[in-house]
């Protein structure tokens, strides 16, 4: 019997078997962590060869070994309930007084639930079961040569458990979840650290997580905490709005105390939204519960990010809620062009009215000694070219390398083109395969010969112009 790890044979033993069952005991040591494999070879007494039993059996069985010195037990102490917009104190220590380095994070549980996120524990990764890295062979058949004509080579291989898989598990910022990350921090032996920060205006539930490590030892702890107070407000709007639209703004008011009877709700907006009628309304509660009050809102004939600020008051309690919403033009781009051939010595005068909504339109004057190619309109189309395969991605950014040589660009357009080229380079990286070439679509394993040459040509030209 031998004890083996992912890289070496730790110990070997010769064991005399007993009739029926043979028990063998050994002491686990730190060099066996995180996993040790027991490799057993059983040899049949070689007195005669005419039997139906295997001449030799062998098997491998894994044993998970946990070293207590590699485990940290962070302790997280904080309130069982948090009030929005209030000071919060978190205390961090280690259950056994060990020193450690740790990070502290607080995240909206609704955001974590989208991906079923669990608090990471580095110990599970650094001390996961290792694969058996020792190859085993013997000279039994060459030395003994004890094979009956009926049996030939009969082997019974165990260790099936080894093969089993382990259990696996400048636009509006419309939604502002609570995501706070602090650290790393040092915790001395036997010490306790205290952290204080302000909870943002948020209602829901947050998970506070501590992930720690120190000198090869790791650990993690988390705690879910509701965030609420006696008076809360929740306002709702569509995902986006268009110019000069009228919508309802429902505001849901929650009271968790029977003492809150009269609630005043006030709505304030920026210049992109207008409240139709009064911006303040009152609600009457007979007991704790929730009610909805609605406001009529109309968008202005402008584009941008509209803001809504809701304030609910009752007695000494106050609740606030903010919304950012994009006001965007739902119509497609419209281009109106006019061309004129001017002979030598002539002049041309034209009255021009820009198409589209004020603030969204531009005028480009293009002059050339050759027939016009409408370069301004084609430039804008190129910048908005849809990204997709390696050909489309490269085609959208390749010509932008040379636009400054074809026409004069203002600083805003130069910045936009530089951003586009850098984004194109980053996106092309996602097409790269293991052989160094580029696939036609991201995620494909086979390189495209034509696409690799096309994208490679662009990357070389971009590099020559100073991109990296």
Image: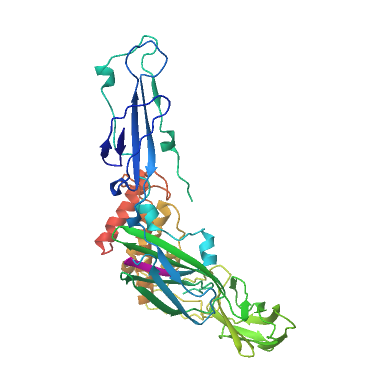
Front residue (pair 410, 84): 84
Up/down of 47 relative to 62, above or below: above
Q: Main secondary structure of the magenta part?
A: strand
> x, y percentage for residue 191?
34, 73
* Left or right: 232 as drawn, with respect to 156: right
> x, y percentage for residue 238?
62, 72
Q: Quadrant of residue 22?
A: top left
* Left or right: 379 as drawn, with respect to 267: left
The quadrant in which the C terminus is found is: bottom left
Which residue of the protein is positioned furthest toward the bottom in this rendering?
315
Front residue (pair 174, 393): 174
Residue at the image point whose x is 35% and y is 55% from the top: 68
Q: Quadrant of residue 100?
A: bottom left
Which residue of the protein is positioned furthest toward the right in this rendering?
286
Asked if residue 374 shows in the view, the reply is no
Up/down of 451 relative to 47, above or below: below
The quadrant in which the N terminus is found is: top left
Which contiguous range is marked in magenta? 98-105
Residue at the image point whose x is 38% and y is 63% from the top: 423
Q: Quadrant of residue 121?
A: bottom left
* Left or right: 7 as drawn, with respect to 313: left
* Left or right: 32 as drawn, with respect to 256: left
Up/down of 160 relative to 324, above or below: above
* Residue 301 falls within the magenta-colored stretch: no
> x, y percentage for residue 160?
43, 33
Asked if residue 106 shows in the view, the reply is yes
* Residue 102 falls within the magenta-colored stretch: yes
Residue at the image point whose x is 37% and y is 31% from the top: 59
> x, y percentage for residue 356?
55, 75
């Amino acid at each position: 019997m031998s004890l083996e790890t992912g890289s070496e044979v730790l110990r070997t033993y010769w064991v005399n078997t007993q009739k029926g069952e043979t028990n063998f005991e050994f002491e686990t040591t730190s060099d066996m962590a995180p996993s040790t494999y027991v490799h057993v070879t059983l040899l049949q007494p070689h007195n005669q060869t005419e039997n139906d039993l295997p001449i030799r059996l062998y098997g491998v069985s894994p044993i998970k070994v946990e070293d207590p010195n590699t485990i940290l037990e962070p302790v997280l102490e904080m309130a069982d309930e948090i009030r929005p917009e209030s000071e919060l104190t978190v205390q961090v220590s280690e259950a056994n007084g060990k020193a450690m380095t740790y990070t502290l994070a607080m995240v909206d549980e609704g955001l974590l639930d989208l991906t079923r996120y669990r608090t990471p524990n580095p110990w599970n990764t650094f001390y996961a079961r290792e694969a058996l890295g020792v190859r085993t062979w013997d000279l039994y058949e060459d030395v003994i040569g004890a094979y009956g004509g009926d049996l030939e080579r009969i082997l019974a291989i165990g260790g099936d458990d080894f093969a089993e898989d382990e259990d696996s598990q400048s636009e509006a910022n419309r939604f502002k979840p609570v995501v706070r990350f602090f650290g790393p921090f040092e915790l001395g032996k036997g010490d306790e650290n205290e952290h204080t920060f302000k909870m943002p205006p948020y209602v829901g539930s947050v998970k506070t997580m501590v992930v720690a490590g120190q000198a090869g030892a790791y650990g993690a702890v988390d705690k879910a905490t509701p965030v609420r107070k006696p008076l809360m407000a929740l306002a709702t709007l569509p995902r986006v709005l268009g110019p000069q639209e009228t919508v309802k703004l429902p505001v849901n008011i929650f009271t968790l105390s029977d003492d809150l009877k009269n609630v005043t709700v006030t709505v304030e907006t920026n210049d992109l939204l207008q409240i139709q009628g009064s911006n303040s309304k009152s609600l009457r509660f007979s007991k704790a519960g929730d009610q909805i009050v609605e406001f009529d809102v109309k968008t202005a004939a402008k584009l941008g990010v509209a803001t809504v600020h809701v304030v609910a008051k009752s007695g000494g309690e106050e609740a606030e809620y903010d919304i950012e919403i994009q006001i965007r033009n739902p119509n497609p781009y419209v281009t109106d062009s006019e061309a004129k051939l001017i002979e030598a010595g002539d002049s041309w005068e034209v009255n021009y009215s820009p198409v589209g909504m004020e603030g969204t339109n531009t005028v480009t004057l293009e002059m050339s000694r050759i027939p016009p190619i409408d370069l301004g309109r084609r430039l804008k189309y190129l910048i908005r070219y849809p990204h997709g395969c390696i050909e489309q991605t490269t085609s959208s950014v390749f010509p932008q390398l040379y636009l400054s040589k074809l026409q004069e660009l203002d600083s805003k357009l130069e910045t936009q083109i530089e951003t586009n080229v850098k984004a194109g380079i980053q996106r092309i990286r996602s097409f790269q395969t293991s052989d160094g070439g580029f696939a036609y679509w991201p995620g494909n394993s086979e390189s495209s010969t034509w696409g690799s040459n096309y994208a490679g040509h662009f990357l070389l030209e971009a590099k020559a112009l100073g991109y990296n």
